[in-house]
Amino acid sequence: MAKTKPGKKDLDSYTIKGTNKVVRPGDCVLMRPSDSDKPPYVAKVEKIEADHRNNVKVRVRWYYRPEESIGGRRQFHGAKELFLSDHFDVQSAHTIEGKCIVHTFKNYTKLENVGGEDYFCRFEYKAATGGFTPDRVAVYCKCEMPYNPDDLMVQCEGCKDWFHPSCMGMTIEEAKKLDHFLCSDCSSDDDTKRSLNSFPVSPAAEAKVEPKRRKR
């Protein structure tokens, strides 16, 4: 950890102006952008310090939204997805608007309800090069795309792979009504002629099948 400069002191916490919310190093926060039309920036607080005039500054590590990255937003990026960047900065603590939670990808997919302060991160991002860690992830469906937790997917009881209903010629409404599902590779020619309702999709109550419900 960098040493505090003379005349400055490290703080254990900072109370967000106008609230009773306390921010500590390690917390994730929402920071006010200069352009009021943009959503708040998301950052991880690394350090809090005050100068001799008691002006409080925070050293942060920025999270990038997919559209802020060099490659831009892609089909498999979730609406609440963030990338933990290698971009560090020092900002006035007064620009902190609130706190948020950046979940691991695995924990995010297990949430019963996704609130406004819930985000997730599965990649680290190098701001200068646009590189990601990890640079490869598992793909699903015949479209061979990584999993987007916002999209409903159904699991084949044969090969156990997950599929988008649209890639299987189904609507989301049809997929939700199914009790079971076999992909085209696992079903025989005769099976594909049957009604969709006779196919062996995962139960609608299963976490990875139901789209996340947003709190309002």
Image (tube, grey):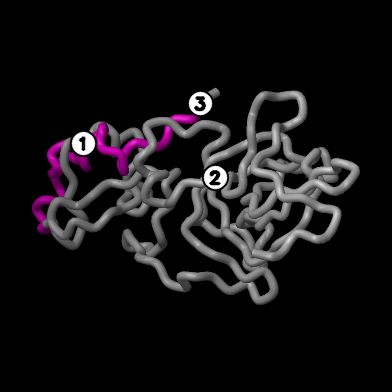
The residue identified by callout 3 is 215
User: Which mark is first along the chain, 3 or 2?
Assistant: 2
Looking at the rendering, which quadrant does residue 150 occupy?
top left
Q: How crowded is mark 1: few (under 14 residues within 10 Å), some or many (20 or more)?
A: some
In the orientation shown, which residue stands out farthest toward the right?
53
SS category of the residue bearing label 2: loop
SS category of the residue bearing label 1: loop
Looking at the rendering, which quadrant does residue 19 occupy?
top right
Magenta segment, which residues? Answer: 188-214
The residue identified by callout 2 is 80
Amino acid at the residue labelled 2? Lys
In the image, residue 88 lies in the stretch drawn in magenta: no
- In the picture shown, does residue 91 fall above or below 96? below
Separation of disc 3 and disc 1 at Cα? 23 Å
Closer-to-camera residue (201/55)? 55
Separation of disc 2 and disc 3 at Cα? 13 Å
In the image, residue 189 lies at what x, y percent?
12, 58
- In the picture shown, does residue 168 fall above or below 39? below
Closer-to-camera residue (70/82)? 82
Separation of disc 2 and disc 1 at Cα? 25 Å
The residue identified by callout 1 is 203
- In the picture shown, does residue 55 fall above or below 159? above
In the orientation shown, which residue stands out farthest toward the front?
6
Give the number of the mark in front: 2 or 1.
2
In the image, residue 103 lies at what x, y percent?
47, 46
Q: Which residue is drawn at 57% across and 49% down?
A: 26
Q: Which residue is drawn at 17% across and 36% down?
A: 179
In the image, residue 100 lies at what x, y percent?
58, 38
- In the picture shown, does residue 3 fall above or below 195? below
- Name the quadrant of the N terminus: bottom right
Q: Which residue is drawn at 64% across and 33% down?
A: 22
SS category of the residue bearing label 3: loop
